[in-house]
Image: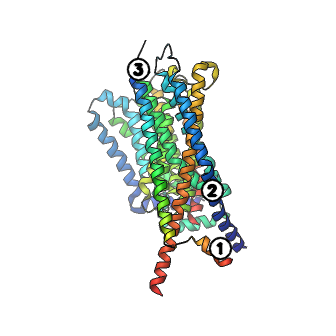
Amino acid sequence: MGALFLRDVRLGLRAGGGALVGILFFLAVIAVVPFGVGPDLKLLSRIGAAMLWIGALLATLLGLDRLFQADRDDGSLDLLIMASDRHMLPLTILIKCLAHWTVSVLPLVIASPLLGLFMNMEAAAIGATALTLLVGTPAITLIGAVGAAVAVSLPRGGLLVSVIILPLTIPVLIFGVSASYGAVEDPAPFLAPFLILAAITLFFAVLGPIAAAAALRSSAD
Amino acid sequence: MMSHTGFVLASYGAAIIVLAALIGWIFIDQRSQRQALQELESRGVRRRSETKMDNAS
Amino acid sequence: MSDAVSKTGRWIDLANPTRFLSLAGGILPWLGGLTVLVLAIGFWMSMNAPDDYQQGSTVKIMFIHVPFAWLSMMCYTIMSVAALGTLVWRHPLADVSAKAAAPIGAVFTALALITGSLWGKPMWGTWWVWDARLISVFVLFLMYLGIIALTRAMDDPAKSAKATAILTLVGFINIPIIKFSVDWWNTLHQPASVLRMGGSTLDPSYLKPLLVMAIGFTLLFFTLHMMAMRNEIWRRRVTAMRRVAARSADRGTVS
């Protein structure tokens, strides 16, 4: 399992710069926002957390179809499915999701405080947003694993994955943004939405790999 | 006291129009499938399962 | 061993949809007639219902809005059961049922949203509010569209059936969220929009037409669902027969 994690991380870092494109996309989305809403710093600082979350969500969705596609192309996906009597397939998928998250989403989380500065956000808001992104984005990847597994046999599955997955990620977005705002604004609580966010991530850490494993098995036979 | 008849009529109208479209689509689909089936049967095409059963009997 | 399995599988393939078709042919006229009757009675009752002292005549929107909202959830539940049927019992009709139900469910969800916003405009002063109930129903609508897109994206019905079933089951989480969103996020929700089916909060003069309309629309749903399932079975037969025809034509030219 450790070897699989290392292999996926190495492949993700090397293969065609897929991880880098996600970060660039994230940067581009955030950079476009001030042009759209105008350079009003007060407004930017108010919507900053939400914009960072939406950017991270879109950038994560963008890279999801690569989760199983590369493995399917070179045939190693079939090997992983066949080895499922030795290693549980959901566990394998969980490891793959973690590797994918480490390579293509963790850089977004690390870059988000810097972009938060561009958006004129307060220090507490930046910290809260980065923390909620750190806790919430794994849920997006794990939900996305289901979509990626369902669409893996499609020739043009990439866009379909995003469309299918987007409705399911909306709760993550809602609680992530409300927790980020809760850290800054007084009446809104921080801990409650943050804990719900963590619960969503843990819930999908169980459900996502199991459903994705079922989908992969059905697409294989 | 308050008259919102327009909204009531609009919502009932929208429901009737949309449901009529759905029912119409199902009926059109039904007719086209029936026609296709009849055309294929008149051309003497039979389903695999039917030919299998004929062979067995 | 494998021969026997495939033979029984073929037998189920043949017999079950055929039996369903003859059953549907017998039931559908009665079901359709009953639907029209109940809906007509419900319509008449709801037109004769008194105006609410607070909401005026807009209370009449409730008689269609609540059944639509209820059916949008029931349809998804039926699709989830069908998805279980596909994955666990491998019932050949379950996949047909799920595929036929998705567009009907999407239409009912859209109607619930449309009538809801037509009700919201005079009552709340706005077409749309981003509260938990509305968001979760909107998410349900998006999920219907995603499922429809997925069923139409694959050519092979057997392959798309399992993929769709898995997606449907994952999306089922949303149904309890919709159901209890009013209770869980009470602070966010406008109390005027809280509609409970419980008879205690609702006067019998509204409850009776509402129940009749709900039964009528449920019958309508089952009628349409059965017809759509029949269409889907016929569609699959047509594709199978076209394939046979193409193969025999091909063989004819070769020999």
Q: Which of C171 and A146 is in front in this view?
A: C171
The amino acid type, in three-letter code, at marker 2 is Ser
Residue at the outermost right position: C1
Q: Where is residue B48 in the image (x, y as percent from the top left)?
A: 58, 72
Can you tell which mark lies on residue C6? none
At horizontal 47% and vertical 63% (from top left) the residue drawn is: B36
Helix, strand, or loop for circle 2? helix
Q: Position of residue A74 (x, y in %)?
A: 49, 69
In the picture, the quarter occupied by the N terminus of chain A is bottom right
Label 1 marks a residue whose chain is: B
Q: What's the distance in space between the residues labelled 1 and 2, CA to CA?
A: 19 Å
At horizontal 39% and vertical 62% (from top left) the residue drawn is: A16
Callout 1–callout 2 Cβ contact below 8 Å: no
Q: Where is residue C119 in the image (x, y as percent from the top left)?
A: 45, 25
Label 2 marks a residue whose chain is: C
The amino acid type, in three-letter code, at marker 1 is Met
Residue to which mark 1 is pinned: B53
Q: What's the distance in space between the residues labelled 1 and 3, CA to CA?
A: 64 Å
Within-10-Å neighbours for mark 3: few <14, some 14–19, many 20+:
some
At horizontal 64% and vertical 78% (from top left) the residue drawn is: B55
Residue to which mark 2 is pinned: C22
Q: Tell which circle, 1 or 3, labels the residue nearer the N-terminal end.
A: 3
Helix, strand, or loop for circle 3? loop
Within-10-Å neighbours for mark 2: few <14, some 14–19, many 20+:
few
Q: Which of C32 and A35 is in front in this view?
A: C32
- For the rendered model, the colour scheme is rainbow
Q: Where is residue A152 in the image (x, y as percent from the top left)?
A: 49, 60
Helix, strand, or loop for circle 1? helix
Can you tell which mark lies on residue B4? 3
Quadrant assignment, res A13: bottom left
Q: Which of B40 and C75 is in front in this view?
A: B40
